[in-house]
Image (cartoon, helix red, strand yellow):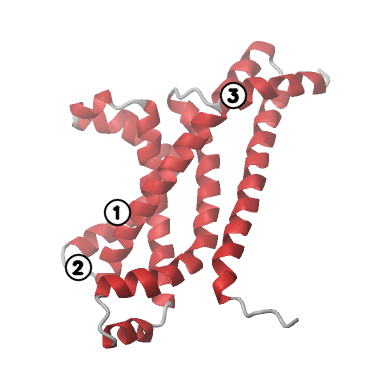
Amino acid sequence: MKFDFEYMISLFPKIIEFLPIVIYIGTLSFLLAILFGLVFAFLTNNKIKILYPILKVIISYFRGVPTLIQIFILYFGVPQIFPSFSTMNAVTAVIIALSLRNAAYLSEVFRSAFLAVDKGQYEACLSVSMTKWQALRTVILPQMVRIAIPPSGNYYIMMIKDTSLAFTIGVIDMMARAKLEAAVTYKFLEAYLMVGLIYWMISIILSFLQSKLEYYVEKPYRKEEVK
């Protein structure tokens, strides 16, 4: 069987129409991962008794178990123990699984970013009668954001690509549509190559936007160019 280039191109509009669900799952998962990651980083950095060892185990689990297994456990396994979770739909299960998994990684990113900021700056803020919140908001957090953006942006791109696992529990997304088309025509190479190219294009666009954001954030710290 020869490679059908025209058929592959014809799949583009059929697959791209499911891009919004991919962006929705990936973006919402990323925002939740940031929230959970900040909480994990705070608890880990302060080594709160009782919570600290439990959190270390939780982080180790989400970092050590493959994403697909975590999705299956959450969607198929958890409802066996907690029947109330049986009403959870597939999209919600994927969002929770991706957000918790990546929160475990982002917690280390945020913790490292916090430690990278000189403690003397925080002490200096307090010495001039600034509150702890004012010191964090105006001095510490902007520098943390500057340090955390590059790795965080990479995780966002990874999460967008990980949404392709959602079809395994019934979510109709780009990967699911490509699989359905391939099952009808038996032109698997064309279908999977097209969905792969679309994900590649998304990654290129997001990488470009990330570089622009990094440039904007770095602007206040960049020395004025000598004319």
Q: Which residue is mark 2?
A: 48
The reply to whether callout 1 and callout 2 are in contact (CB within 8 Å) is no
Where residue 38 sits in the image (x, y, percent)? 34, 59
- Type of the residue with mark 1: Ile
- Type of the residue with mark 2: Ile
Residue at screen point 39% across, 53% down: 34
Indicate the quadrant where residue 134 lies: bottom left
Residue at screen point 42% across, 50% down: 102
Label 3, label 2: how many angstroms apart (C-alpha)? 47 Å
Where residue 189 sits in the image (x, y, percent)? 72, 26
Q: Which residue is mark 1?
A: 58
Q: Give residue 190's mark.
A: none
Indicate the quadrant where residue 1 lies: top right
Q: Which residue is mark 3?
A: 17
SS at mark 3 in the image: loop
Label 1, label 3: how many angstroms apart (C-alpha)? 37 Å
Residue at screen point 62% across, 80% down: 223
